[in-house]
Amino acid sequence: MTTLPNCPECNSEYTYEDGSMLVCPMCAHEWVAGEENNVEEEKVYRDSNGNILQDGDTVTVIKDLKVKGSSSVLKMGTRVKNIRLVDGDHNIDCKIDGFGAMKLKSEFVKKI
Ligand SMILES: [Zn+2]
């Protein structure tokens, strides 16, 4: 059983489903389920300063980062060109000269 949302007009809890619509018997308001909070959330990626990152941005690394599976360290200040934002824990896909394809966390970079 799913709980129906309260009426967005009068906040009555006696709403019921009528086909794809929700109906409030108290004020006769009808609406489409889910429409009352239909704000599409677009995923936003921010750098360490809170600036919004976009595909193709150039960033620098703000601290020395160990490279997974190797003994090399990605030095603070390393410039990373043409980043690609992806979903996940490491949300930046990029290629770094001398390192190849890598994934970084947006919190460890700064947009330049
Ligand atoms: Zn109502």
Image (spheres, helix red, strand yellow):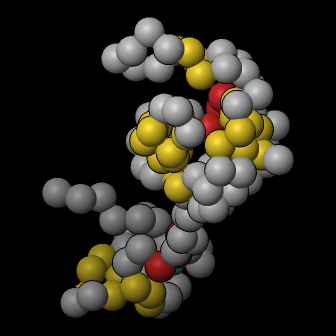
- Does any portion of residue 44 appear in the rendered image? no
Percent position of residue 55, x then y:
60, 61
Percent position of residue 75, x then y:
67, 20
In front: 14, or 81? 81
Of all residues, the one furthest to the left in this rendering is 1
Asked whether, in this view, residue 48 is left or right of residue 81, the answer is right
The structure residue drawn at horizontal position 17% and vertical position 57%, both measured from the top left corner, is 1
In front: 46, or 36? 46
The structure residue drawn at horizontal position 49% and vertical position 88%, both measured from the top left corner, is 29
Of all residues, the one furthest to the front in this rendering is 98
Asked whether, in this view, residue 38 is left or right of residue 60, the answer is left
The structure residue drawn at horizontal position 63% and vertical position 61%, both measured from the top left corner, is 56
Percent position of residue 27, x then y:
52, 85
In front: 65, or 108? 65
Percent position of residue 49, x then y:
81, 37
Q: Quadrant of residue 46?
A: top right
The structure residue drawn at horizontal position 53% and vertical position 53%, both measured from the top left corner, is 85
In front: 110, or 87? 110
- Using the image, determine if residue 28 lies above or below residue 7: below
- Using the image, determine if residue 110 lies above or below residue 67: below
- Using the image, determine if residue 3 lies above or below residue 109: below
- Does any portion of residue 109 appear in the rendered image? yes
Q: Quadrant of residue 69?
A: top left
Asked whether, in this view, residue 5 is left or right of residue 85, the answer is left
